[in-house]
Amino acid sequence: MALAEQTKIPNPIGESMPRIDVFEKVTGAAVYTDDIQFGPQLLYARVKRSPHPHALIKKIDVSKARALPGVKVVVTGDDFPGHIGLYLKDKHIFARDRVRFVGEPVAAVAAISEEIAEKALDLIEVEYEPLEPVLDPVYGASPEAPLVHPDLGEYEVVNFIFPKPGTNISNHFKIRKGDVEAAWPKCAAIVERTYHIPHVQHVPIEPHVAVAKVDETGEVTLWASSQSPFAQRNLIAKTLGISQSDMRVIAPYVGGGFGCKAGVTMEAIPVAIAQKAKGRPVKLRLTREEEFYTNFVRQGLVIKLKVGCDKDGNLLAMENTMYWDGGASTEYGVNITRAGGYSSTGPFDIPNVKTDSMCVYTNHPIGGAYRGFGMSELHAGIGQVMDELAEKIGMDKVEFLKRNVVQGGDILGTGMKMHPTGIKECIDKVAEALDWGKKAEPSAPNKLRGKGIAVMWKAPAMPPNAGSSAVIELNEDGTLTVNIGGQEIGQGTFTAMAQLAAGVMGVPMDWVRIAGPIDTQYSPYEWQTVASRLTWSMGNAVVAAARDARQQVLKVVAEAWDEDPDDLDIVNGTVVSYKSEREMSLKDIGIYGINKEGDTGWIGGPIVGRGNFMPTYVTGLDPETGQGNRAVVHYTTGAQGFEIEIDKDTGRLEIIRAASAFDVGKAINPDLVRAQIEGGFVQGMSSAIFEEMKLVGGEMKNPSFVDYRIATAADIPPEHKTFIVEVPQDDGPFGARGIGEHPMVPSIAALGNAIYDAISVRLDPPFTSEKIYLAMLDAGLVE
Amino acid sequence: MHNPRPGLPEFDYVRPASLSEASRFLAEHQGEARPFMGGTDTFVRMRDGFWKEKYIVDVKRLDGMGDITFDPSTGLTIGAAVNMNRVIDSPEVQEHYPLLAEAAKTVASFQLRSRATIVGNICNASPAGDTIGACIVMGGVLKVHGLDGEREVPLTGFFVGPGKTVLKPGDIVTAIRFPVLPQGHAGRYIKLGRNALSDLAIVGVTAFAYPDDTPSGYRFKLALASVAPVPLVPEKAEEILTGKPITDETIAEAAQAAMDACNPIDDVRGSARYRKYMVRNLTRRAVTDVLNRLQ
């Protein structure tokens, strides 16, 4: 029976159960990586970093650092020749021959104290020959730009990424659908716009921290604040030339990930050092400044859009050219640009599409996964040009969106057929919440008021065959231990998985334990905690494992009672027969089996359910046209809107109220879904209004919370309504789709549209008070 | 890349038993010792590597440093170690010097304000200091203990440049004293930050006035934050508001004079152009608010 066809959804699936990790997190008992004690043998690592955005390394002299008492290990790029990377192996653990961004590791030290390690860094002498840096992706894509990676053609790459050797373009994703050139003359209105989306940072409360130990036999253990213990095991092991099973990654709770603790960033450094540390554990903890300078960033984007529609407002064509500022390495970022490519139309039905999504090497910080994975940046442009086009053709904006959004059965830009989706209902909910169509008066004479709405879609961006697995064991007390490899990063996945296991198995919620911390030695495989994929993918695996365990139990009991398993059920932790009305608690079955009548032997044994899930139906796309049968597993869609006021004296944007609606297929835990919508909304609004890495000459000029402003509780608007729409997903557990990233995707465009409604000016984010005021001044709106 | 791995340097913590001992120590270790109060600037500057003092001289617990006293005939004295939350909560401050509480409330966050002090804010001499304007317009005078004993230093002329004051080696500011304010006074501090909470002032405008025998009927005092190397008093704007009958045009003229008086810089927090306009607009708003409070 297909999951979505199961009509009755068992408790507590769909209930707003309290988080199972709430007590330990609220009391401070929850263990994070930095809490773990490693004893007096612990060494402290520090990293020597490049001060140049682009330079050749002429010489590194570490002799003085090695001679400093207390220093145990000094390493440089010479020690680690291998490449590392998720999709494109273009990165070294330490720079070799050449540095490509300010902050790139060139050497590292491990010493018996942080202070000695720090002093040793100052004793490392590095001679550089500065090169011309590439600081703009449009220039970087041009033939004039110096090459950041002259060896691009030699890097190992997955089969769905298309680098162009001899250029700075490490991936070029194309869509050629229909004929845009033939469509333009048929358009009654055309809008052309270019938007620049700045780099932003994840700023998790917990900075990156990792501890590595290599024992005498070469077995590696890594403790890390990580979204991706299995991917880290795989990538680091490959780079260091060891077997995956000789590497163990233990991942305690994570104090905020948002994508920056996915893939491998700094985690390889302590492992590399530990290989030379003779069994001593080596710890590396980034400072906040290092987080800003050296962590993955949400890469910048220059997006050039041209869209047109007929006189009735039907979209006819889109041309979308994206220059992604991939930074010094695009090992992870290439797939963001692919996702930006296959989703490049936004959630719109457009017959003629021409897309060029280019991942461009620059000498900026390395672009990596960031909540939304390219979608916020892409939608910042699309959401605003659609708004503009609606106005140009003279249609109500909500009406225009509803006329053009994708619906089940539509053939998408990639040739994939769209599944059913509730995007129109999302638009209606948001429009209604904002009293769309009614213009409210400003609250004061010096205020300007406006409303804006934008829609979004996002697919899980991952390799086509990213897998999940789960193992469920029964315990003596009847409880279930659910073993999974997906990480709890605050999103509530442990709670959702416990609900799925409890519901499918037929036990109370408090009979479920999630085995943690995630440990690659014991936990079943999970690709990565990214892409909003866990509820869906890992959820499918947990449901399968719970069904397996349940069937094992029913089979054992059926045999003991001489009944048909189909007449049995598990209700509230007790096996019941609807035929004989017999009952037996799981406590009497799970481990020891059942004694046969008259003590004539035993039936059963420890119950261990197993389940896995891997999408098998995603196909490749033609490199020249982007066409294929199924580009992605599915799309989550949604809408968001704002009503705002702008202070004419200061340019300050004040959100009066906001609304968000997303189609999650099925909310396994509605309160947690709402929490994700609220959290994503705040992050989206923060990135839209405040956040920007100010990069000058390749160097970030605001690497602290003093000058990298993020929204605080005081910036959150008084009213934000959230709506959950549920059009079931055929390949999701009980119809569920992901929601982790989506709520921040439409924020920039929705706010940009509201600002336009208030002041008739279009701006690049962030929409700071200064930018808005000066724009009003230049437009003559204020004197 | 500025110091990606900041950290506190090694230093000695010194706690003198008396002000005289403290002044002597500071004078003897000129350039390598610094008195500290809440430490909210000191430790940050040291961690970031801007200050490299060998000695941190804790004068918080010396006599009178932790007291707030109010005398209806002589005024208010706030000891150098009194934290901002105590100032904000003080009934005497709220009743007689509400502008000071209003300005202090805009500083950083509640947590920081339970360490930060008014005197520290002044001695740090940042042009962005939120409470400095209130102290200037209400006639604050610093009590300073130096090698030659106690003396008083008015805030006028106290600031020399960013982080620089007229204090000499061995000087310790022990308190700030405010005179009894004229009857009917009113004040306003408007801080423009990039977001709603805990930012530094991109621009800060302090306005203060009281009824007086002048053409406008008031004596006006103004101070501007973050628009010059030191906290700025736009005297011409003050004169306009004092010397002419108050109309919308007078207010606009004064606001323009304030804008013309300031000399802000472009930095990562804001452009000079934006800051100048904000001085004009927020001066207009602050003066209007003060007039409403006066009536």
Image (cartoon, helix red, strand yellow):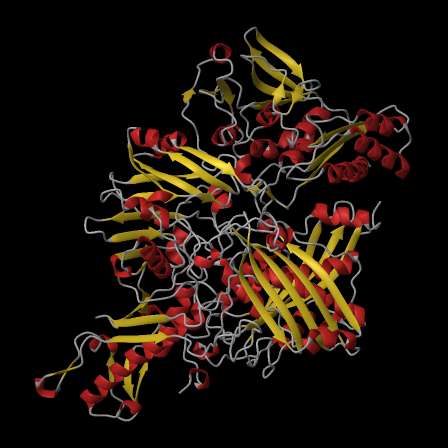
Tell me which corner region of the image, top left, top right, bottom left or bottom right, holds residue B116.
Answer: top right
Q: Of A702 and A237, which appears nearest the observer?
A: A237
Residue in the picture at 62% in, 70% down: A346
Q: Of A269 and A735, which appears nearest the observer?
A: A269
Q: Of A146 and A492, which appears nearest the observer?
A: A146
In the displayed structure, A34 sits above or below A494; it is: above
Looking at the picture, how far across and down is residue B114, in whole percent? 53, 34
Q: Is residue B211 shown to the viewer in this render?
A: no
Looking at the picture, how far across and down is residue A779, in whole percent? 82, 51
In the displayed structure, B219 sits above or below A243; it is: above
Q: Is residue B252 left or right of residue A754?
A: right
Residue in the picture at 30% in, 91% down: A567
In the displayed structure, B239 sits above or below B199; it is: above
Looking at the picture, how far across and down is residue A509, in whole percent? 36, 71
Task: Count all numbered tags in the image, as a single digit.
Answer: 0
Task: Quadrant for the C terminus of chain B, please.
Answer: top right
Looking at the picture, how far across and down is residue A438, in whole percent? 78, 68
In the displayed structure, B164 sits above or below A711; it is: above
Q: Is residue B238 left or right of residue A564?
A: right
Tell me which corner region of the image, top left, top right, bottom left or bottom right, holds residue A688.
Answer: bottom right
Q: Is residue B206 left or right of residue B122?
A: right
The residue at the far top in this view is B148
Q: Is residue A331 shown to the viewer in this render?
A: yes
